[in-house]
Amino acid sequence: MALLELEGVEASYGRIRALRGISLVAEKGEIVALIGSNGAGKTTTLRTISGLMHPAAGSIVFNGKHITNEAPDRIVQLGICQSPEGRRLFTRMTVVDNLRMGAYTRSNAGEIKKDMDRVFELFPRLKERRNQIAGTLSGGEQQMCAMGRALMAKPKLLMLDEPSLGLSPILVETIFDIVREINAQGTPVLLVEQNAHKALEIANRGYVLETGAIVQTGTGKELLESAEVQKAYLGM
Amino acid sequence: MGGGFGPLLSFLATTRGGLDGHLVGALRKARSSVQSSLVTRVIGIALAAVVIIYLSPKVYALGPSYFLRIVAVGVALGAIYALIAIGYTMVYGIVELINFAHGDVFTLGAFISLPLLVTPFWHLTEETGGGWGIVLPLIAVFLIVMLITGLINVGIERVAYRPLRNAPRLAPLITAVGVSFFLEGVMYLWKGAVNLHYPDLLPSNRFVGGTFSAKDVIVIVAAVILVAGLAFFVNQTKLGKAMRATAQDRDAARLMGINIDRTISATFFIGAVLAAAGGITYGLYINSVNNGLGFPIGLVAFTAAVFGGIGNIPGAALGGLIIGLIRATNDGYVDPQWTDVVTFAILILVLTLRPTGLLGMRVPEK
């Protein structure tokens, strides 16, 4: 049984149809990449899984449970946590408080502390800046804080929306290393990226979205070598 | 309701921002911040100079003990305004609604407390009153009234604001005005449109040559305790932090598993708890309440909230204090008939010159 399974999911913003029947699968232990250009529906897919939007048709099953019309707070409790596009930190709170907000649905103080230490291990920069107001962090640090915050929910599936957006090349490198590290420690990742090359390099499998529909799928390697993907997304 | 309402409503309707939008975000963006802060500073200093030159001979002529008396009254009234202003600012911070019914929630607190002062367990009237014996019953009355009023406000949010959460922002603003009329109407049917005597229970001993009364001190201490409790709740507890998170970024809060319906309810509850405490305090201090009290006092408290920086809790407390002092000064040294004019002139000046208020956001939003 797949960890997450979307079946024919449709969603729209008012009269604009953003998703036209998305079906995709994420298995335990995988990194799955969603790639596509602006407006293809990548973020909308994540918002629909998170429950910020409800699909007009189709079903979403997580861990054997229908979550199609669940509220976002319930979905977090079930084990999906998202680091949203644009980071969306609580800019007037400290780094530590942001991380604590990530653990909002949890109550075991000892385990929360342990996960906080784990986040600080992954992101030593955050430890240095733990008492700084999040809005004053640099872009890369904010991205680390957003990923750390999502990890604090101890998700069974971590969703990352454009983690490399707006970062310097060296930081992009770091962020992708950390995504791989998070996955190696046992957390499946659903990764949305414009940086298709990097995303497909670390992904087990990938899906290519175009105007709200999946047009191609395969392993990361297959997609990297596919002529269409190379032409459209890798600039070759 | 005042006549200036229509323009205010349309003004508020035309100023809409994003999740963190401020009252006059458009205005703020329209000009360079350097220029505007310079202009604001010059005008502010000029105004302060004029006021000081105008007032100092009067202050000198009337003597120091009169001045201290004015300060005491100003701080005490300011403390009450602060209790109300915090509710305005918290609700605005989390749902971007100017809750025009908030002043009436304040009056409702005073009204609910009136029958509760006399129960089989205690009998708080002016005949029996006085002494330490009233302390515990009075605290009990405070707690009961705060709880009841808080729950009523949670109900109001459920009925009048939540169904409109995704509607254009003018819609809940109008229902807020409707709730205001409704509450005033209910209190009118309950007690009539007369000035009700509120029992004078607090001791009126005076200190420092008659300048400070025990009443002033008790009112100020009560407000300080309540605001300190609020600060602890908002900064230290999980629910309090969740409220701040919801105010800062609603969708991000939902993605953290925060049930925003619950945090919004909690915000309305706490706003009403403080307003109700303010209502009782006002009754004990002024000894007279009526069903229409909430609207004028609410507008003054709203001014205080804008003055301090709408959405900012310490700002609301500070704004309340300053507005209380300004009003007391005007009452005492100029002419009480001009006090409302001065208050709302401040509202206009703040909105045009420094829409983010005294303690407006200093941190970039995104």
Image (tube, helix red, strand yellow):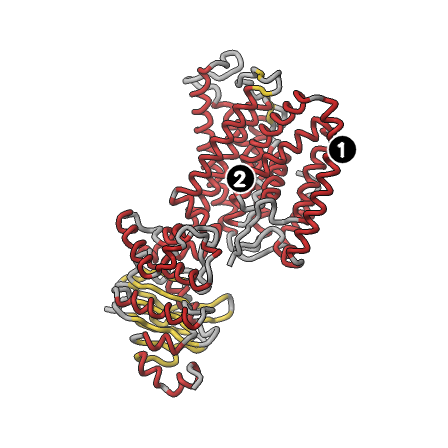
Cα separation between marks 1 and 2 = 32 Å
- Of all residues shown, which one is farthest toward the left? A1
The residue tagged with tag 1: helix, strand or loop?
helix
Pointer 1 indicates a residue of which chain? B
Number of numbered labels in the structure image: 2
Q: Residues within 10 Å of mark 1 (few under 14, many from 20)?
A: few
Q: Earlier in the sequence, mark 1 or mark 2?
A: 1
Residue B99 percent across, percent down from the top left: 56, 43
The residue drawn where x is 50% and y is 23% is: B115
- Of all residues shown, which one is farthest toward the front? A128
Answer above or below: position of B174 versus A11: above
Return the residue at label 2: B86
Q: Amino acid at mark 2?
A: Ile
Which of the pair B181/A203 is nearer the observer? A203
Left or right for A6, reference B93:
left
Pointer 2 indicates a residue of which chain? B
For residue A110, say whether it is visible: yes
For residue A71, say whether it is visible: no
- Of all residues shown, which one is farthest toward the top? B127
Q: Residues within 10 Å of mark 2 (few under 14, many from 20)?
A: many
Q: Quadrant of the N terminus of chain B?
A: top right
Q: Amino acid at mark 1?
A: Tyr
The residue drawn where x is 70% and y is 43% is: B45
Residue A133 percent across, percent down from the top left: 46, 52
The residue drawn where x is 46% and y is 63% is: A139
Return the residue at label 1: B54
Locate residue A159: give its quadrant.
bottom left
Which of the pair B43/B31 is nearer the observer? B43
The residue tagged with tag 2: helix, strand or loop?
helix
Locate residue A222: give its quadrant.
bottom left
The residue drawn where x is 67% and y is 22% is: B64
